[in-house]
Amino acid sequence: MDERKDLTGGALIIRGAGILGGDSADILIRDGLVAEIGQGLRERTGAGDVEVVEAAGLIALPGLVDLHTHLREPGREDAETVETGTRAAARGGYTAVHAMANTDPVADTAGVVEQVWRLGQESGRCDVRPVGAVTVGLRGERLAELGAMADSAAQVRVFSDDGKCVWDAVLMRRALEYVKAFDGVVAQHAQEPRLTAGAQMNEGAVSGRLGLTGWPAVAEEAIISRDCLLAAHVGSRLHICHVSTAGSVEIIRWAKSKGWDVTAEVTPHHLLLTDDLVEDSPLGSYNPIYKVNPPLRTRADVEALREALADGTIDCVATDHAPHPVEDKETEWAAAAMGMIGLETALAVVQEAMVETGLLDWAGVAERMSAAPARIGRVAGHGRPIAAGEPANITLYDPAARAAVDPAGYASKSRNTPYEGLTLPGRVVATFLRGRPTVLDGKLT
Ligand SMILES: [Zn+2]
């Protein structure tokens, strides 16, 4: 704590970073804000109380913002806590995350969202914006206290029953109408429950060969279609969580073409991994590390998701960081929990899937991993350009690094990463939250 404080006293200069991958410049930070951007700032500011962070060869991005993180506290502190999850977030280059509501107790009252918000404040490494549940206990029967959560200290703007779908059309309509009063958004986990009862993986050739119950694309696409129509009908904002199929992309593209206020996210794993890994992978067959909701889909779906993220049909990347303890994942496929961690690999996977393929440049990455999620979640002070007068939420990234993923060193309490042993590009070198380093030289401060 004290060490971190020392660095906030004076000014700080990030020397020679390529802003959004462009020309290199020095960034002078003072009192938590970007004070000036230019050349030779170290020389001009003199030898006073100025910390210097050397950043030659590094890219400066606005601090990343995640719309979809499972921090698991309260209730599953064996999987993750706000403290460990925000450490993982900082190591991944994030300065703000949204904490999903499917905790125990569920974040469906002002009391619980304020508790999560307060824990985030105490952690100090990353701002935590609690997501409020749409329905009481995520049970899909009646609306939670949306207004009370919006008015609370946590100022909830994103509401989601994530993990479950708000499948009742009347409840979904009411939620969409209700959140308009405080500029909120309903983030839907689109999954028709009857079509996915007992589903274990994507429905297709691989599930047929393996004899696992399939999860049809139509179960996702039917809910997305319905909700786009409902959002248009009531004139409200809809956000679609973890889009995973090519068909979903087509529906969202159509909804956007009508001018409807629909936004969407894709996870890093759905941009890189496919369902055939369940049958055959470097980590063996039937490895539950690949069990996730929504499931990994086909190569054609991955191609469509990448294209949609590039052309703006999908607005942003969200991790769906879903930590689970070893005993819940390292078990037989049918019994294993669904989900994978992702905060500490998100930027590397996006570089691999989107930048190395020429689909996005770094300005495009900044838009989709910082600006857009901050806009959708109404997160003030984040997702802003790196410019004089703006809050100094900045990530320094080395795109030339390459290393095999080794979860042993992760800050997350859980280890359920599907990338273990895989060589991925890039390395988060430093993260600054309002000018204060939360990560330096790849390590937590
Ligand atoms: Zn979900």
Image (spheres, rainbow, N blue to C red):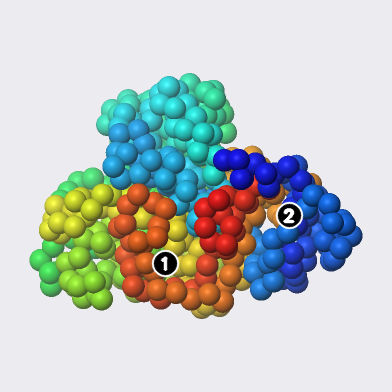
Label 2: state its secondary structure.
Answer: strand
Relative image position of residue 388 (x, y in whole percent): 80, 51
Relative image position of residue 85 (x, y in whole percent): 42, 46
Residue nearest the observer in this picture, 78 or 334 = 78
Amino acid type of the residue that numbered disc 1 sits on in the rendered structure: Leu
Find disc 1 in the rendering and name its residue.
271
For residue 298, which numbered disc appears in the image?
none
Label 1: state its secondary structure.
Answer: helix
For residue 51, which numbered disc appears in the image?
2
Left or right, 218 with respect to 183, comes to left
Relative image position of residue 53 (x, y in whole percent): 69, 61
Q: Looking at the picture, does residue 156 appear above or below residue 430?
A: above
Relative image position of residue 280 (x, y in whole percent): 21, 75
Amino acid type of the residue that numbered disc 2 sits on in the rendered structure: Glu
Is the distance from the Cβ of mark 2 to the nearest ligand 1 atom less than 8 Å?
no
Residue nearest the observer in this picture, 265 or 78 = 78
Residue at 32% from the left image edge and 39% from the top image edge: 77
Residue at 50% from the left image edge and 63% from the top image edge: 347
Residue at 52% from the left image edge and 58% from the top image edge: 443
